[in-house]
Image (cartoon, rainbow, N blue to C red):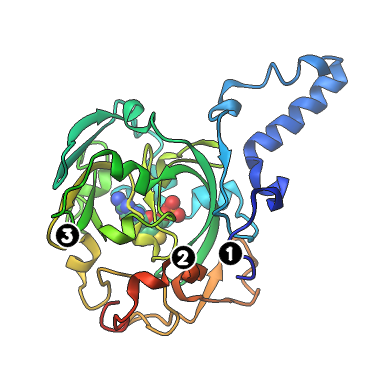
Amino acid sequence: MAILIKKPNAIKASEITPEPVYLDRRRFMQQSLATGFLLAADAMLPAWAKRWPELSKSVFNTGDEVNSFEDITHYNNFYEFGTGKKDPQKNAGSFNPRPWSIAVEGECDKPGVFNLEDFIKPYALEERIYRLRCVEGWSMVIPWVGFSLADMLKTFAPNSKAKYVEFTTLLDKSRMPGQKRRVLRWPYVEGLRIDEAMNPLPIMAVGLYGDTLPNQNGAPIRLVVPWKYGFKSIKSIVKIRFTETQPRTTWNLSAPKEYGFYSNVNPIVDHPRWSQKKERVIGLPFWAPKRDTELYNGYGEQVAHLYQGMDLRKNF
Ligand code: MTE
């Protein structure tokens, strides 16, 4: 990745204008022009186009081309709605992520149970354009809407025993039909070491492309940890727990030789079944050359210090 972090003024307009909003706005402007209502056009934009009016632009953006809204919402891993890439889009449509509450527990001084709106209210929402690298060997670039995980965790005053943070997805077979099959141990659980979680890069995402999070991408709130394989970025979170011991995570429990706790993107540590040297960029034609995978997914400058002195082959 040539440019890791861009200055806000270096972000292209095409990167920060939500694709569906942009297309809709252009269509609307054309129609308005034709009918002579141009002055009223902006005021008459549909309400959803202004869902996050206060969005600030982050300095943490890759310089890469973003994937289309179509790619991001039709090629998903969300086993709670099926194991195929198109299943989440097909099966999550009727999932209603409201009302939603989040419990914060464990080694902290200010635990509690919060409804989603109260939970996210204190934090400044930003657009963060991150590459998501899946352990299966593909990647895409997503314009998330979210807020700093570190800022959020500090609100709950973790104590000196808080060495890790554990995240849990909703468990509800009636709303997440994929949980009727025992393909994984439900609910889905993920975790980070506390210093990883306190790094400025991870976010709690509540939207993408300027709008709220589509169900298939983990509505209403999910984690995004850009230097780790995609499975660490757990979706539809209902519980956050500070722990003294390393959390037992879903993929590690399901296949410990294949999925470690750390799961940092690393081209020289192969998955037993797949090389990690290259990655297929979703959205490019099938004959396009694959991209070289970068250590820590290109975010080494921000995170390499977290793993100094650690054997990355053992701690995969
Ligand atoms: N979270 C839950 N609860 N269930 C899942 O199956 N899949 C993970 C991760 N988070 C998953 C999950 C995997 S393997 C990947 S690659 C990313 O979500 C995919 O995120 P996306 O569909 O928004 O691109």
Q: CA distance from mark 3 to mark 2?
A: 24 Å
Instruction: Pick the residue in front: 269 or 163.
Output: 163
Q: Mark 2 highlights which residue?
A: 302
Question: Pointer 1: what residue?
Answer: 4
Q: Secondary structure at mark 1?
A: loop
Identify which residue, 77 or 115, lies in the foreground. 115
**Which three-letter amino acid code belongs to the residue tagged 2?**
Gln
Q: Residue 265, relative to residue 141: is it above or below?
A: below
Judge the density around disc 2: few (<14), some (14-19), many (≥20) Cα neighbours within 10 Å: some
To which quarter of the image does residue 248 belong? bottom left
Dividing the image into four quarters, tell me where ligand 1 lies. bottom left
- Image position, residue 198 (x, y; %): 34, 54
Whether pointer 3 and pointer 2 mark residues with C-beta atoms closer than 8 Å, the reply is: no
Give the quarter of the image for residue 44: top right
What residue is rendered at 60% in x and 55% in y? 67
Q: Is residue 301 left or right of residue 14?
A: left
Numbered disc 2: secondary structure? helix
- Callout 3 crowding tier (Cα within 10 Å): few <14, some 14–19, many ≥20: some
Q: Which residue is mark 3?
A: 247
- Which residue is at 81% across, 20% downward? 32
Measuring from the top left, give residue 228's x and y in whole percent: 39, 65
Judge whether residue 139 can be spotted in this image: yes
Callouts 1 and 2 close, C-beta under 8 Å: yes
Q: In front of the other: label 1 or label 2?
A: 2
